Amino acid sequence: MRIAVIGTGGVGGAFGVALAKAGADVTFLARGAHLAAMREHGLQVEGDRGNSLVHPVRATDDPAGIGVADVVLFCVKLWDVETAGAAIKGMVGPDTAVIPLQNGIDAASRLTPILGSKAIMGGTVAISATIAAPGLIKQTGTFMAMSFGELDGSPSPRGERLLALAKKAGFAVTLTPAIETAIWIKFIMLTGVSGVTALTRLPIGKLRDDPDVFGLFESVMRETEALGRAKGVKGLDGVADKHLAGLLVSPPTVMASMAHDLIRGNRIELPWLAGRVVSLGKELGVPTPANACIYAALKPYVNGAVG
């Protein structure tokens, strides 16, 4: 199976390495020092699941040179969706599956006008991983899961092929007819964890034992759950409760990628996380005061360091 990984950050790097080790023909799209290190030393993943190295590694900064892929794991940051989507048109053949694995809830709908509805599947992942150094992905915790499925819930032969490969790769994987629900389940968790860890610049272990801070996690997640139900997404009852219980047993060093980006002075995905909750809440008449507070407090950092 030919797989193109578009965006070799924590998500694309970790899942791409696992699939390459399982025998897939994986090409990574990367740039700068990260790409240079990959070409010289390979791409390495280190963390609580163990260490894994792909060397030599297929890696390029030229989307046009990759060719048609069976699966495109689309892992760029949310502000790059349209630009990167246009750049990968040459990778899309009649049966290619483009699976956006970004945070948020809108990536698939943003890609559809660019690549066509037939090419796009829905997808979501659960992992805590980031680029620790050029050529090195650092994973925190042992959880590593991917869910994907056709947007209309139909049977998916191409999804079945990826499912078989992903099982061989050793991470948790689900081919689901209800991918919208899976995406929203993650979104409920992510708005809380990304918002609060970014706002405080601290990992979960420094936050969850304080009842006031835990209350902020709770408020954000419950608002997002209510918003999903108001939008008509099925299967969300009790999701916030499950995420809050999971928060208590998560590895204490877990921080959302948005918090890592904020600390590094990089651009952050806030408009598509807390910002999207606020805008959709206004559309649907659902109050979102906790998300609105996080959005307002972090908005000055949307484009990177202030000063």
Image: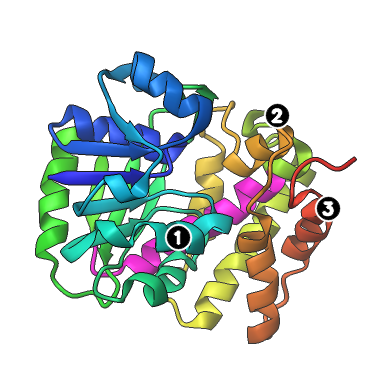
| Mark 3: amino acid | Pro
Q: Residue furthest right?
A: 307
Q: Is residue 295 visible?
A: yes
Circle 1 packing at 10 Å, graded few (<14), some (14-19), many (20+), is many
The span picked out in magenta is 176-196
Name the residue carrying label 2: 206
Q: Say whether marks 1 and 3 touch (CB < 8 Å).
A: no
Picture quadrant where residue 257 is located: top right
In this picture, is 158 found above or below 134? below
- Any mark on residue 126, and which? none
Task: State the image quarter where residue 54 is shown.
Answer: top left
The foreground one among 268 and 235 is 268
What's the mark number on residue 300? 3
The circle on residue 185 is 1
Query: Residue at the location (72% across, 70% down)?
Result: 288
Dot 1: element = helix
Q: Marks 1 and 3: which is nearer the front?
A: 3
Residue drawn at the location 52% of the way across and 45% of the way down? 245
Measured Cα–Cα span from mark 1 to mark 2: 24 Å
User: Left or right of 145: which side holds 37?
Assistant: right
The answer to whether 273 appears left or right of 15 in the picture is: right
Where residue 127 sits in the image (x, y, percent)? 43, 39
